[in-house]
Image (cartoon, rainbow, N blue to C red):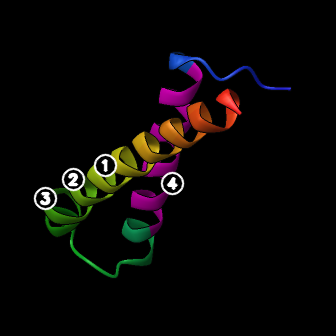
Amino acid sequence: MVEFNAVTTAVAFLAVIVVGIGGLLGMGFMTFRTTMMMVAPSMAIFGLICLAIGVQFGEYRAAQ
């Protein structure tokens, strides 16, 4: 079982972002500049929002 601490969570978070951006760049769907200036920050912000909601939900479930 994986113990989720700050380091494990950060590595998993960055891995998902890197794989997503790499896939977009590999497809050639958008230019590098567009991907890095528009898509990457959006993915990071959305990921942080989802991470915060997930942590709050986990705390709620652990308190039950």
Whether tag 2 and tag 3 are in contact, CB under 8 A, the answer is yes
Spatial CA span between label 1 and label 2: 5 Å
Q: Are marks 1 and 2 in contact (CB under 8 Å)?
A: yes
- Looking at the picture, how far across and down is residue 26, in whole percent? 44, 69
| Distance of label 4 from label 1 (alpha carbons) | 12 Å
Mark nearer the N terminus (3 vs 1) = 3
Q: Nearer the viewer, residue 48 or 23?
A: 48
**Mark 3 vs mark 1: in front:** 1
Residue at numbered disc 1? 44
The residue pinned by badge 2 equals: 41
User: Is 22 included in the stretch rendered in magenta?
Assistant: yes
Q: Is residue 13 left or right of residue 35?
A: right
Residue behind mark 4: 19
Q: Are marks 3 and 1 in contact (CB under 8 Å)?
A: no
Quadrant where the C terminus is found in the figure: top right
- Earlier in the chain: of badge 3 and badge 4, it is 4
* Classed neighbour count for the residue bearing mark 3: other residues with Cα under 10 Å, few (<14), some (14–19), many (≥20): few
Could you tell me which quadrant the N terminus lies in?
A: top right
The residue lying at 52 percent from left, 17 percent from top is 7
Q: Which mark is residue 37?
A: 3
Q: Amino acid at mark 3?
A: Met
